[in-house]
Image (cartoon, rainbow, N blue to C red):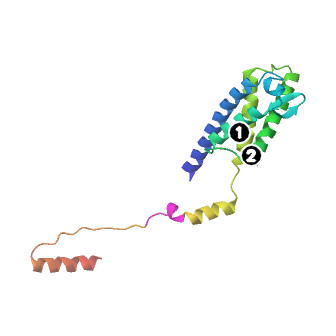
Amino acid sequence: MSGGRSARIWLALGAALGIAVASATLVRRDSAPGGAAAASGDVVATVNGQPVTRDKLARFAATLARERGRLELDAAERRRILERLIDEELLLQRGVALGLERSDPAARGAIVSAVMDAITSEQAREPERAELEALYREHANEWARPGRVTVEAARVPADAADADARGAEIARRA
């Protein structure tokens, strides 16, 4: 079970890293305040005057869907992504207020990474004891130890009289 758990942890870490890298790239493209998408009216949210575009939401959702091995995400997941993008913008604005450069890739990457860690930690919850017990019952044969069997080989002579005597000896020992 330890091997399966560590594999899931590595998978989650790899997915989070991939999403963070892809997100940092996407965020860098949208770093210009009030860009062309904002002018076209394709804004899904505005955070203190800064637009969150439909295109940015779609790219982020597509990246996350690919990481999860799906074609698209459902409405609830897209809503959570939008909330995360809004949180990211608020964090960026706070960073700017503290003197960070808005377009600084390292700062944006760290923020995106923190957001992605929050998303993956929501999904990687500890299972309840009842869930673990049910899983064990369903797959008990996978964790069961096989029984022990002792095998002994005996050579039986071709002569019938010797064979009967040898057979009787083996039967006594068994």
Q: Could you classify mark 1 by the number of other residues whose Cα lies within 10 Å: few (under 14), some (14-19), or many (20 or more)?
A: many
Q: Residue furthest front?
A: 40
How much space separates mark 2 and mark 1, taking CA atoms?
8 Å
Q: Position of residue 42 (x, y in %)?
A: 81, 32
Q: Please, what secondary structure does the residue beneath circle 1 have?
A: helix
**Amino acid beneath label 1:** Ala
Q: Relative to 156, is 112 above or below? A: above
Contact? badges 2 and 1 (CB < 8 Å) = yes
* Front one among 127 and 167: 127
**What residue range appears in magenta?**
140-146
Direction from residue 8 to residue 42 in the image, left or right:
right
Q: Which mark is residue 61?
A: 1
Q: Relative to 167, is 83 above or below? A: above
**Amino acid beneath label 2:** Glu
Q: Position of residue 13 (x, y in %)?
A: 63, 39
On the image, which quarter does residue 131 sit in?
Answer: bottom right
The answer to which of marks 2 and 1 sits earlier in the sequence is: 1
Q: Which mark is residue 77?
A: 2
Q: Quadrant of the C terminus?
A: bottom left
Residue pictured at 20% horizontal, 78% vertical = 167
* Front one among 78 and 22: 78
On whether residue 135 falls in the magenta region, the answer is no
On the image, which quarter does residue 152 sit in?
Answer: bottom left
Direction from residue 60 to residue 171 in the image, left or right:
left
Q: Residue furthest right?
A: 48
Q: Position of residue 156 (x, y in %)?
A: 16, 72
Q: Position of residue 59 (x, y in %)?
A: 70, 34
Q: Residue furthest left?
A: 159
Q: Please, what secondary structure does the residue beneath circle 2 have?
A: helix
Residue pictured at 61% horizontal, 37% vertical = 14
Residue pictured at 67% horizontal, 38% vertical = 62
Residue pictured at 54% horizontal, 48% vertical = 3
